[in-house]
Each structure stands twice: as structure tokens, then as C-alpha cells.
Image: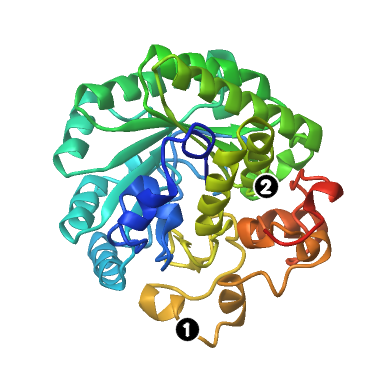
């Protein structure tokens, strides 16, 4: 996760993270990527069921009236007890569509009562006024609602007419209750042209946050592998995101803007600042070192609807254990799970240009799911890294 507004526009300084001690239990959510201990932000895909049929779903979601979810409410509470005791700072309820589970509000309340921050990732279509009020009352920290562009593009991606308008109504219902809400957008060739619309939308609707996700080739998203942007297109998109973020900032309408799932974005922001503001570039380099790049298997964890534990939500085909059989904390720190231990420091294991890259300490080897999907080699270079050979050579930074 690369904070474009934080890094490029200077809304967070290196001292901000240091002031909190850089331990995840003490850091506010917007600084968690700078934590030193990297306790895992845990994504729980609490159900595989969903009311939409998204073409890029990494979870292969199924009908909302599908099978009963394998993890019961009581088992989920035991899992939350373990996560809270382990020090996981955030529990992200995802799916499928988390709002198809009737116990979502109860479990979110249970997580916040145990001292965790609870957030949800949702398509937004099921957030009624009543549901928004319930989520606010239990102390939910954040609601991330996915959009794929303007109405026609979004509804085509989601497979259900009217889903765009329903999602925006969900945004409005959250805002009416004072819930922090933001947008999530996954970039590919079909919708890259919609990015200006998303910026116009967050300004018009006064939405404080937006995350732009680079495409990861997993689940149904694997079929879109050949619709990922090429390197020149990616550079142009990241420049556009920086330009629009700066424009809002300079007009006194700052938004929290992040890019996710491609840690080449960090060095790319650094290179641009070297040209525009060298002093700020040095400060950004310090923040990028704190961030440490991709955190799959270390600062990010995923628990599936069936209890399986994964390094992240995209490496679902690799399972380290199951919380129905063994506590998450015991699985996550098990020294005998070789791959999980390797993921906690990928640098000695990555190959090719990744191993030679001077930004390896900053990027962390980028996304293993994308490398494996494209090449069949888990430790191969991430094909979505758009830095040139000239940019990655030289002394480590």
C-alpha cells in the first residue's frame, strides 16, 4: 500500500510514525504501513457468498443463497479472541460480500470490544440506512466500497444492472451516519479510462479516501491477466493519480489517495520527487524504508471462509493451516512452515532482476501471486514491475 497523498503531497512526515513508536498496537490506521513489528492486518473472507457476479473476483464468489458458511458465529468469536491476543491491529471483514452474513454486525462489535479495529470491504449495495446505523453503533472504523468506473462500466463488471447506483446509495447511507467511507478501484485495460471519473466523484460526494488497486492474477481475475496494463500504461496511470491527487491538495480539497498491490509505485513516486522536490524525495525515501514494501505473510494475513490461513487473499492456493484445527497465532509463528518463514523476509529468495534491484529493501520483492501466475515460479520477478533496468541498477538505497 503506497500512500500517494502521504508521500507525494507531504500529508504525513517521517516523524509522525516515529512519534507513535512504530508499533502496530499504538499506530493509527493511516500509519500502519510504517509499523516496525508488522503484526498482521488480517483479511477474513467471512463468506464466499455474494449478491453480485464480478468478472474480476479473486474469491470465486458464489450465489448468496449458497452453502452455509463453515465458520459459525461462536467459532468466529474464538478466532477473534486469538487475533486480539496475538496483537493483530485490524480485522478486515471481506467476502464474497460480508453483508450477506447476518452476524457481521455482531462480530464487528465483538472485534472492537476486544480492542481491534474493524473495517469492511464491500460492494456497498446492501448498506441500507438501518445497516449503516448498526455499523456505526458497533464502532466500525471504515467502510471500503468497490467501484469499477461510471455506471455502464461498473454494472458490466459487476454483472448486475443497477449495482452502481446501489453502491453510491450505500456511500450516502454511511456518510449520513458519520461512518468513514472510501472507494476501491481495480485498474485494468477495460476501465483505466475511468480514473478521472473516480476523482470527480470523490470530490463531488466529499468522499475522503480512495484506493487504486493494481490487478492481481487470482480467482476470476486470472482471466484478466492479459488485460493488465503494460508498463508504459501503468506509468501513465500512476502519473495521472499523482496529478489529480496534487490538484485536489492544491485546491484545498485534500483526499487520502493510495495505490495498492504494486510496490514499484514507491520508487516511482521517489523518482518523480527527485525531479520536482529533491528535499521531499529524501524524506519519502525514509518513509519507504519504514514501509518495507510487500508484506504478504508478515504484515498481511488472510483467513478464508473455511478457516484456511493464507499469506494474503491472492495466495489462496497455498494454505498454512486452519483456524478450526489450530489457533491462527500458532500457525502464523510456526517456525516449521518453511514458505511462511521465507515470506517474512523474501529478499534472499527472489530471483532475476528482483534480486539485483537497488529498491529491494523498499519494495520487498513485490507480489509473489502475480509472479507465480505469470511464470509458474513463485520467486520469479513480478511481471507488473514497471521500473526500467536503468532505474533499478546502482547501489541499494
- Position of the C terminus, as image quadrant, is bottom right
How far apart are labels 2 and 1 at the CA level? 30 Å
Q: Sequence-wise, which precedes: disc 2 or disc 1?
A: 2
Relative to 26, 3 lies left or right: right
Q: Which residue is mark 2?
A: 264
Q: Which residue is mark 1?
A: 334
Helix, strand or loop at disc 1?
A: loop
The nearer-to-camera label among 2 and 1 is 2
> Where residue 110 sits: x, y (%)?
19, 56
Mark 1 burial class by Cα count in 10 Å: few <14, some 14-19, many 20+: few
**Taking the image as drawn, is residue 60 in sight?**
no
> Where residue 295 sits: x, y (%)?
54, 60
- In the image, 224 versus 250, the foreground residue is 250
Residue drawn at (51%, 86%) of the image: 335
Picture quadrant where residue 40 is located: bottom left
Residue lying furthest front in this view? Answer: 279
> Where residue 92 sits: x, y (%)?
37, 51
Residue drawn at (46%, 60%) of the image: 304
> Where residue 46 sits: x, y (%)?
38, 53
Residue lying furthest bottom in this view? Answer: 336
**Taking the image as drawn, is residue 246 in sight?**
yes
Amino acid at each position: 500500500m503506497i500512500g500517494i497523498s502521504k508521500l507525494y503531497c507531504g500529508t504525513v512526515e517521517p516523524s509522525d510514525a516515529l512519534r507513535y513508536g512504530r508499533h502496530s498496537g499504538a499506530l493509527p490506521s493511516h500509519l500502519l504501513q510504517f509499523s516496525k513489528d508488522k503484526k498482521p492486518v488480517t483479511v477474513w473472507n467471512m463468506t464466499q457468498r455474494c449478491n453480485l457476479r464480478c468478472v474480476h473476483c479473486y474469491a470465486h464468489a458464489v450465489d448468496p443463497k449458497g452453502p452455509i458458511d463453515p465458520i459459525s458465529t461462536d467459532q468466529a468469536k474464538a478466532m477473534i479472541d486469538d487475533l486480539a491476543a496475538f496483537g493483530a491491529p485490524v480485522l478486515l471483514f471481506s467476502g464474497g460480500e460480508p453483508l450477506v452474513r447476518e452476524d457481521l454486525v455482531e462480530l464487528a462489535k465483538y472485534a472492537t470490544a476486544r480492542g481491534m479495529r474493524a473495517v469492511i470491504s464491500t460492494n456497498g449495495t446492501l448498506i441500507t440506512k438501518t445497516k449503516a446505523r448498526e455499523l456505526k453503533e458497533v464502532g466500525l472504523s471504515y467502510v471500503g466500497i468497490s467501484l469499477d468506473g461510471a455506471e455502464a462500466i461498473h454494472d458490466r463488471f459487476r454483472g448486475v444492472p443497477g449495482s452502481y447506483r446501489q453502491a453510491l446509495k450505500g456511500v450516502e447511507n454511511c456518510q449520513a451516519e458519520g461512518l468513514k467511507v472510501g472507494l476501491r478501484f481495480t485498474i485494468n485495460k477495460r476501465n483505466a479510462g475511468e480514473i478521472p471519473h473516480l476523482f470527480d466523484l470523490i470530490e463531488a460526494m466529499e468522499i475522503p479516501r480512495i484506493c487504486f488497486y493494481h490487478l492481481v492474477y487470482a480467482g476470476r481475475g486470472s482471466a484478466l491477466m492479459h488485460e493488465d496494463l503494460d508498463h508504459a500504461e501503468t506509468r501513465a496511470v500512476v502519473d495521472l493519480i499523482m496529478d489529480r491527487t496534487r490538484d485536489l491538495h492544491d485546491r484545498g480539497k485534500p483526499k487520502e489517495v493510495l495505490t495498492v498491490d504494486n510496490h514499484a509505485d514507491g520508487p516511482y513516486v521517489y523518482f518523480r520527487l527527485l525531479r520536482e522536490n529533491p528535499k521531499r524525495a529524501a524524506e519519502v525515501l525514509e518513509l519507504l524504508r519504514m514501509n518495507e514494501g510487500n508484506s504478504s505473510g508478515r504484515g498481511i494475513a488472510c483467513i478464508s471462509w473455511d478457516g484456511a490461513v493464507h499469506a494474503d487473499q491472492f495466495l489462496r492456493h497455498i494454505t498454512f493451516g486452519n483456524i478450526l484445527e489450530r489457533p491462527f497465532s500458532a500457525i502464523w509463528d510456526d517456525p516449521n512452515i518453511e514458505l511462511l518463514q521465507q515470506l517474512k523476509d523474501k529478499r534472499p529468495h527472489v530471483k532475476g532482476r528482483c534480486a539485483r534491484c537497488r529498491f529491494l529493501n523498499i519494495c520487498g520483492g513485490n507480489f509473489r501471486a502475480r509472479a507465480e501466475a505469470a511464470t509458474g515460479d513463485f520467486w520469479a520477478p513480478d511481471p507488473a514491475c514497471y521500473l526500467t533496468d536503468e532505474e533499478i541498477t546502482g547501489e541499494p538505497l
